[in-house]
């Protein structure tokens, strides 16, 4: 697949992301202060940077697990069909679970993942997303906590890709075709 040339304009700096994650971690700590061992579930691949930074700010007993869900492939359009490519390693029945997502866009990915995890009867199931793009929503879905609300721009960096590139940028940038 070939892509038109583009540049990336910074939208949210690494420093702002770090500051916001400190605040979010305090909220999560309060929410789960009585939890024996919280299961923090990262949705691969996009959330790998966010989950790494978030769990290091949590002063709580946590277990980290991953689920791989994919709907975008290499393009900019959701397929609306969320495929589970890799399941959790652990059981979540009766457990407190926090799903960590990089971005909620149409909402299909988080919606379908939450539905699927609910069938396993966790005690408590909450979600957190670094970014929220509410103007593009196609299903009624919101993460319980959000880092930043963003406009309708295709973003990359801090774990998020365009055609599997740019995940390693330390900031969130928007893609601008040249
Ligand atoms: O709200 P939605 O419209 O469903 O979009 C959000 C999802 O899309 C992206 O994942 P993608 O399918 O590209 O896989 P990736 O995480 O491996 O990049 C992103 O990481 C979210 O998981
Ligand atoms: O803005 C985005 N950028 C990259 N991947 C995405 N998947 C959903 N929305 C986006
Ligand atoms: Mg993803």
Image: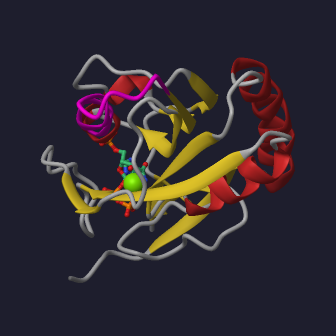
- Quarter occupied by the C terminus: bottom left
Q: Residue at x 38, y 35 (%)?
A: 93
Residue 29, position in %: x, y?
78, 28
Residue 106 quadrant: top left
Q: Residue at x 40, y 61 (%)?
A: 89
- Quarter occupied by the N terminus: bottom left
Residue 66 visible from this viewpoint: yes
Q: Residue at x 77, y 45 (%)?
A: 17
Residue 46, position in %: x, y?
48, 59
Can residue 123 be found in the magenta stretch? yes
* Residue nearest the viewer, comparing 15 with 25: 25
Residue 22 quadrant: top right
Residue 90 quadrant: bottom left
Can residue 41 be found in the magenta stretch? no
Q: Is residue 141 above or below residue 92?
A: above
Residue occupying the far bottom of the picture: 2
Residue 44, position in %: x, y?
43, 61
* Residue nearest the viewer, comparing 63 with 53: 63
Give the number of marks. 0
* Residue nearest the viewer, comparing 127 with 151: 127
Q: Is residue 14 left or right of residue 110?
A: right
Q: Please give the range of residues in magenta.
A: 113-125
Q: Is residue 28 left or right of residue 149?
A: right
Q: How is the image coloured?
A: secondary structure
Residue 60, position in %: x, y?
79, 39
Residue 174 visible from this viewpoint: no
Q: Residue at x 35, y 73 (%)?
A: 163
């Amino acid at each position: 697949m070939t892509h038109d040339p583009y540049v990336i304009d910074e939208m949210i700096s690494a420093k702002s992301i770090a500051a916001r994650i400190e605040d979010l971690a305090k909220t999560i700590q309060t929410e789960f202060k009585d939890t024996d061992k919280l299961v923090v579930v990262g949705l691969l691949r996009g959330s790998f940077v966010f989950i790494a930074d978030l769990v290091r700010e949590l002063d709580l007993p946590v277990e980290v697990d991953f689920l791989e869900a994919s709907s975008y492939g290499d393009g900019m359009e959701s397929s609306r069909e969320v495929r589970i490519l890799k399941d959790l390693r652990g059981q979540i029945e009766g457990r407190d679970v926090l799903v960590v997502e990089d971005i909620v866009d149409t909402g299909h990915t988080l919606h379908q993942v939450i539905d699927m995890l609910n069938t396993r009867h966790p005690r408590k199931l909450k979600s957190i997303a670094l970014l929220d793009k509410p103007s593009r929503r196609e299903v009624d879905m919101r993460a319980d906590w959000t880092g930043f609300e963003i406009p309708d721009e295709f973003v990359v960096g801090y774990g998020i890709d365009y055609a599997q590139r740019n995940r390693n940028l330390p900031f969130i940038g928007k893609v601008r075709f040249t």
